[in-house]
Image (tube, rainbow, N blue to C red):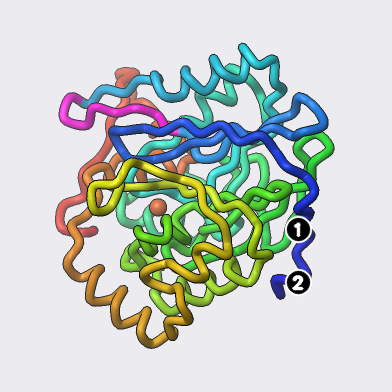
Amino acid sequence: MLASNYPVDLAVKPDVKAFFDPATNTISYVVKDPSSNACAVVDSVMDIDYAAGRISYEHADEIIDFIQKSSLELEWLIETHVHADHLSGAPYIQQKLGGKLGIGNQITVVQETFGKVFNEGTEFQRDGSQFDRLFQDGDTYKIGNMTAFAIYTPGHTPACMVHVMGNAAFTGDTLFMPDGGSARADFPGGDAATLYDSIQKVLALPEELRLFMCHDYGPNGRDIQWETTVGDEKRHNIHVGGGKTREEFVKFRTDRDAQLDMPKLIIPSLQVNMRAGRLPPSDESGKTFLKVPVNSL
Ligand SMILES: [Fe+2]
């Protein structure tokens, strides 16, 4: 879809509350419709001490507490993509507060890929049915009276989407802050040229549109930040700004990705997030296990 065909409404200005998770450098958001008490949660986190095999919910509880204290109604839990660096806290929040859980419809491709990697049996559904809603490019939905919509932005992963809610857009890993550049494109199903094209879709949106990042690592020792604008990214993004060409980007991204280590939490993250943030089913003894596939990632 062309940028001009997306239903952007800059006059609607949602309240955006950010929750930074220092363990994974993830930023989760509560986005409130300015004209009602309805809200959405974007990219929540479930805590894990992987070395100890222990999960907990401090980060998610903080979000739940904020929503309850502000008397908000949770209508949507949005995952911008299947994260490889943190576990989603969405089902835990949904269980406490309700709301519908949504992700891009290409989740089925990710489920197919990692269903194989983790040798999941036929009981692992690869049709996205673990989610309440599978979005296609341009699909709209309501948060109270506010219209939100999804833009299909593959490249980092095959199921990535940017969600626009009023004058705020949640970029997932399609973009980082201008001095952070862009996310890697070397996971299975990722592709640097595709990522460049997806970023161009975001940069074609109105310059004043606020952009909220899913991650920030404070490059060059600066404080953690998560908010910028389309105009700022267009001019200053170190990987794609100032009119960098597709060829320049692909070369840079490919060389850089070849040097990166796997994210520390990729193995538990994928197993849980491909199930919409749920743990694998327990075995006959009632215990729950995560697998470590040897030499297959
Ligand atoms: Fe990611």
What residue sits 56% from the left and 18% below the top? 66
Q: How packed is label 1: few (under 14 Cα within 10 Å), some, or many (20 or more)? A: many
Asked whether mark 1 lies closer than 8 Å to ligand 1, one says no
Q: Secondary structure at mark 2?
A: helix
Q: Which residues are magenta?
A: 45-52
What residue sits 21% from the left and 49% below the top? 293
Q: Residue 259: x and y, percent?
A: 17, 67
Q: Residue 169: x and y, percent?
A: 61, 51
- Quick check: is 196 in the magenta stretch? no
Residue at the disc numbered 2: 4
Frontmost residue, 214 versus 207: 207
Frontmost residue, 269 versus 285: 269
| Residue 108 position (above or below residue 100) | below
Q: Residue 88 appears in which quarter of the rendering? A: top left
- Labels 2 & 1 near each other (Cβ < 8 A): no
Quadrant location of the C terminus in the rendered image:
bottom left
